[in-house]
Amino acid sequence: MQAPLNSETDTTTADTSGVESRIRIVLVGTQHPGNIGSAARAMKTMGLTRLVLVDPQKFPHNEADMMAAGADDVLAAAVEVQTLAEAVADCRLVLGCTARSRRVQLRELDPRTAAASVHAEAVAGGEVALVFGRERTGLENGELQLCHAAVHIPANPDYSSLNLAAAVQVLAYEVRMALLGGAAAAPVATAMPDAAPHAELEGFFAQLADTLEAIDFHKGRTPDSAMRKLRRLFVRTGLDSHEIRLLRGVLADAQRMARLAGRDPH
Ligand code: SAH
């Protein structure tokens, strides 16, 4: 017997429902409230509803409401936080969208590959964030460092910066195509089904930074470059919670030895 359209057995709709709810769009430091409304509209047309605003300059605002044009439910449900770290604390995959070739050394994905990763991670039960920067200055280096990979829309190299909401539309469309394609979407390596939530990884990085200080690893050099490379290394491996606990145990012992050696005043 043929299944009726729109029933539970219609895979094009049934498979995507729970998955979409694990995908959030994060807008960092948005300057023009109209762009927030336009982004909400772009999301809703593609079936995405979770909008997180990191320190928006003007919100709520009537220009946002005007541009949302029927996506006011997405705007009304938007969550506001102060930092990107808060916005992605429970995420297992965080992708940062950049208009320029990145200044931090992150793996760079095109939107289609990124969407396949988003799909794979969300289907595996992980929370996923797509992060967008400020209209004038994009994402700061420190913010990009919180991301597992960068996403660049391969636009005209001489004019590569899309309007914020247009960039959201492109990514949301690709995510929708990946969700509609279901299992047909190519699995990619950035999906990390057991990866620890972002906040755990950040806790590890903070302790790693303290430990390097305590054992005088930097010897007067600034810690930034080494930390950037170490972050990149560990983000690439997709550490799970057990591995993070193990590594933090190693760091705790190194810190203890440094204290015994009289190196670490803490
Ligand atoms: N002048 C800024 C551009 C910001 S555009 C800069 O040079 O960084 C606002 C945001 O839209 C960007 O931070 C990025 O998240 C997204 N965006 C714009 N163009 C993009 C592109 N070609 N690829 C990926 N994201 C893009």
Image: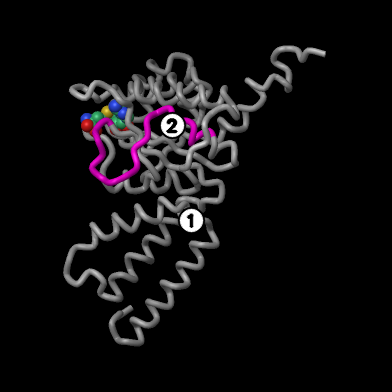
How many discs appear? 2
Q: Is residue 233 above or below residue 114?
A: below
Q: CA distance from mark 2 to mark 1?
A: 21 Å
Label 2 sits on a secondary structure element that is: helix
From the image, tell me which residue sits under label 1.
239
Residue at the far right: name it.
Answer: 1
User: What colouring method underlies this structural image?
Assistant: one colour
Q: Which residues are magenta?
A: 99-119
Hey, which quadrant is residue 63 in on the image? top left
Q: The N terminus is located in which quarter?
A: top right
Q: Is residue 219 magenta?
A: no
Kind of residue at disc 2: Thr
Q: Is residue 126 above or below residue 266?
A: above
Residue at horizontal 30%, vertical 86%?
262
Q: Is residue 107 magenta?
A: yes
Kind of residue at disc 1: Leu
In the picture, the disc for residue 113 is 2
In the image, taking residue 58 as reference, residue 46 lies left or right, namely right
Q: The C terminus is located in which quarter?
A: bottom left
Q: Is residue 224 visible?
A: yes
The answer to which of 21 and 196 lies nearer the viewer is 196
In x, y percent, where is residue 22? 55, 36
